[in-house]
Structure formats: C-alpha cells, structure tokens
Image (spheres, rainbow, N blue to C red):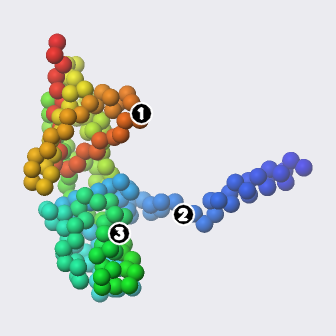
Amino acid sequence: MKTPLLLLLCIVYALPLLGQTPKDASPGSAPSSNYRLSANDLVQVKVFQEDDLDATLRISKDGTIQFPLIGSARIGGRTVQEAALTMEAALREYLTRPQVAIRVMEYSKRRFTVLGQVMKPGAYEMPEDQAMNLLEAIGIAGGYTRIANPAKVILKRKVNGAETIFKLNAKTMATDGENKRFDVLPGDTILVGESIL
C-alpha cells in the first residue's frame, strides 16, 4: 500500500517540472542573466528567419552597434535579454514580429580599481560573464586593512562623460541582508576610507 502512494506523490510533485529546461543549459555558451554588455564586447546578433540581417559586431565606446535597417542601436549597459528586446522594438518598424537572439562571442577586458585602506590596492579584471558587487570587489583587493572604515567608501564612475561620486556604506551592506547590492561597473574606482583613531 505504501509503495503506490509514494509513487503517486513523486508523480504529482514532478508534473510541474516536466518540459522545463535548465537556464543556460550549455555552460559557457551564454553569459549569466545579470551580465551587462559593455564597450568592446563582440556580439553575434541573429534575427529569426532573416539570415541576411545576421551580424557579428563589436560594441563601440558609446555602447552602440551599427545594425542593418535601424542604424545605431544602444545595447551597452543592458543585459543580453534587454539588448535583444531593444533590437526587436527598433526592428518592428521594418519587420513583422521580429525575434532577436544575441550571443557574446568575446568579452572585453573590464577593469576596476580599488584604492585606500585595502590589503592589495590596485587595478583588477572583472569576471568575464558576471556582475560584481562592491563587497566582492573589496574582497578581491584582499579585504580591509586594520585601520579601514567600511562605512566610508567612495566610488567614482564616469556617466555620460562626467564623473559621478557615490558615497557608500559597505559595513551596512555586509550586515544588512535586506540592503540592496551595489554593482561595480568597468572603469569604476573604489576608495576605502580610514578610521579616525
């Protein structure tokens, strides 16, 4: 009596999983879903049933690619999925229900710098296919020195050619599970402040 009941329960719990395929089924073939495209990434753009539009393009410094029919398309700073949706929206002016697939063929060298009160200050390369948050970046730089003040972190970033400064509290980020992560972008400079003794 117990065996058929157990079998029935297994079938009931397995039913919702039928037909599902794991995301990024082939490792290395696609970037993680939170990876944001950046300048100098080489991307392959395919439009379903429009082979003459297929192209392999390098993203320019301003985050754009030059694509047939639509010209300049800004995809830098977007995830692969967001970039595909952007391309589809632009192509709707010329095609009926276009379906775009984007694949990263080659990642640009993406670097960030950590200075101030960390064990190994310097410039570091970001992982190719994933985002990195502030705490991970500080960890790569060896973590804090004895006199560091994690509550006093400054991050400098170029936004549209102008320098933007973010004052961040890494101590709160580390202790407050509900606090949103702060992603580091290529070209960012992180400065960890010093405790006043």
Whichever of callouts 1 and 3 sits on the residue coming sooner in the sequence is 3
Is residue 118 visible in this depiction of the protein? no
Residue 177 numbered tag: 1
- Furthest toward the left, the residue is 162
Residue 66 x, y percent position in the rendering: 19, 75
Tag 3: residue type? Leu
Q: CA distance from mark 1 to mark 3?
A: 32 Å
Q: Residue at x 23, y 79 (%)?
A: 70
Q: Is residue 179 left or right of residue 160?
A: right
Q: Residue at x 35, y 59 (%)?
A: 31
Q: Is residue 41 left or right of residue 85?
A: left
Q: Residue at x 25, y 26 (%)?
A: 151
Residue 98 location, quadrant: bottom left
- Furthest toward the right, the residue is 1
Whichever of callouts 1 and 2 sits on the residue coming sooner in the sequence is 2
Q: Are marks 2 and 3 in contact (CB under 8 Å)?
A: no
Residue 182 x, y percent position in the rendering: 29, 41
Q: CA distance from mark 2 to mark 3?
A: 22 Å
Residue 85 numbered tag: 3
Tag 2: residue type? Thr
Image depth: mark 2 or mark 3 in front? 3
* Residue topped by disc 2: 21
Q: Is residue 177 left or right of residue 142?
A: right
Q: Nearer the viewer, residue 192 or 72?
A: 72
Q: CA distance from mark 1 to mark 2?
A: 30 Å
Callout 2 crowding tier (Cα within 10 Å): few <14, some 14–19, many ≥20: few
Residue 129 location, quadrant: bottom left
